Image: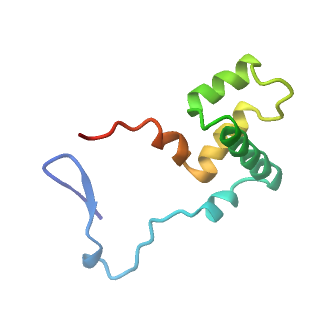
């Protein structure tokens, strides 16, 4: 099904297979793997990241685990779930990218 390339990558040539192949996972598909409460807490974690100016996930973990955020209902697991459901936080990544000259 998959074939290797000279550069070490693996490819799937879809035109050689008669069946349609879908390799896209949506947020709705990801949400189905979690309970409603977990999805709500993941959304709350992302909202807190927004309010804090989009820190990196690593910084967010440190703030939560060290107790730097007083009275915060967000846990480290909520941050992990947010990444699993929504993917990497785009706003956090945009500020960390290096610009090409």
* The N terminus - image quarter: bottom left
Q: Is residue 40 left or right of residue 57?
A: right
Point out residue 18 in the picture as x, y percentages from the top left corner: 33, 82
Residue under the point 23% across and 40% down: 101
Which residue corresponds to the image point at 54% horizontal and 45% vertical from the top-left?
91
* Residue 101 in the image: above or below residue 69: below
- The spot of residue 25 in percent (x, y) is 53, 62
Q: Nearer the viewer, residue 96 or 74?
A: 96
Left or right: 100 with respect to 96? left
Res. 80 image quadrant = top right
The residue lying toward the viewer, choosing from 85 and 58, is 58
Which residue, as the protein is rendered here, is positioned at the far bottom? Answer: 18
Q: Quadrant of residue 61?
A: top right
Q: Nearer the viewer, residue 75 or 56?
A: 56
Q: Residue at x 67, y 39 (%)?
A: 49
The residue under the point 38% across, 80% down is 19
Task: Judge whether residue 84 can be spotted in this image.
Answer: yes
> Is residue 48 toward the left or the right of residue 72 in the image?
left
Indicate whether 23 appears above or below 70. below
Viewer-closest of 16 and 82? 82
Q: Is residue 11 left or right of residue 67?
A: left
């Amino acid at each position: 099904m998959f074939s290797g390339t000279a550069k070490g990558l693996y490819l799937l040539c879809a035109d050689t297979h008669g069946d349609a192949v879908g390799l896209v996972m949506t947020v709705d598909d990801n949400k189905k793997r979690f309970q409603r409460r977990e999805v709500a807490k993941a959304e709350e974690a992302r909202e807190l990241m927004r309010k804090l100016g989009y820190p990196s996930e690593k910084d967010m973990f440190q703030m939560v685990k060290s107790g730097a955020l007083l009275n915060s209902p967000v846990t480290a697991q909520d941050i992990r779930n947010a990444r699993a459901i929504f993917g990497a936080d785009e706003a956090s990544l945009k500020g960390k990218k290096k610009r090409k000259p």
